[in-house]
Amino acid sequence: MAQEAGAVSSGDAAPNTIALVRRAYRAFATNDEKLLRRLCHESLEVRPVDALGFVSETLHGFDAARDWVRRRRALGYEVSIWIRTLEAVSDDTVLGVGVVSEHGRTGNGYAATVAWVWHVRDGRIDCVYGYPSEAAARRGLNGRE
């Protein structure tokens, strides 16, 4: 499920930040919860975005995010995430653009090109916010959304 993403760097810390996001994505994609937990703060905030481009409420805490994923799986949702590009927009912030594909119990499938913004603090991810588009994510980075 993991796919390599392109990268654009903007500073000395940027390559390390992109590498951290890549490692976290791979851990998520392979269900490596132990590694993912080590890469993220316990106070992690996650705002999921689904395969229709709908943004969910923000989840607070690593365990809350993990439980949300487990509930979705228990309801029969099969989700795949491909990150196409990663861009370091600052030394502690990465913008990613990719696709979320989802299939439910009914066999209906959906896919959307979406975006995420990761923030890194003290060498670990402290928040991941999903957006319905790259443009919306860029507006969010500028405080306009």
Image: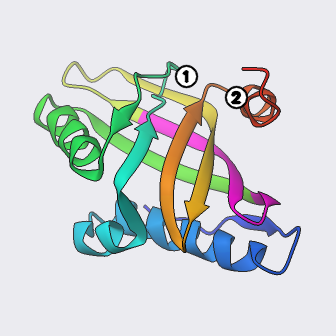
Q: CB under 8 Å between callouts 2 and 1?
A: yes
118 drawn magenta: no
Q: Secondary structure at mark 1?
A: loop
In the image, taking residue 57 as reference, residue 71 lies left or right, namely left
Q: How is the image coloured?
A: rainbow
Q: How many marks?
A: 2
Q: Residue 78 in the image: x percent, y percent?
A: 28, 39
Q: Which residue in the structure is indicated by mark 2?
A: 133
Q: Is residue 69 above or below residue 106?
A: below
Q: Residue 143 in the image: x percent, y percent?
A: 77, 28
Between disc 2 and disc 1, whose residue precedes?
A: 1
Kindly identify the amino acid type of the residue bearing the numbered disc 2.
Ser
Q: Residues within 10 Å of mark 2 (few under 14, many from 20)?
A: some
Q: Main secondary structure of the magenta part?
A: strand
91 drawn magenta: yes
Q: Residue at x 29, y 43 (%)?
A: 65
Magenta stretch, residue numbers: 87-101
- The N terminus appears in which quarter of the rendering? bottom left
Disc ID at residue 5: none
Q: Nearer the viewer, residue 52 or 141?
A: 141
In the image, taking residue 103 as reference, residue 73 lies left or right, namely left
**Distance between the Cα atoms at labels 2 and 1?**
8 Å
Q: Residue at x 76, y 37 (%)?
A: 141
Q: Residues within 10 Å of mark 1 (few under 14, many from 20)?
A: many
Q: Residue 23 in the image: x percent, y percent?
A: 49, 73
- Seen as rendered, the residue at the extreme right is 10
Q: Is residue 18 above or below residue 127?
A: below
Q: Which residue in the structure is indicated by mark 1?
A: 53
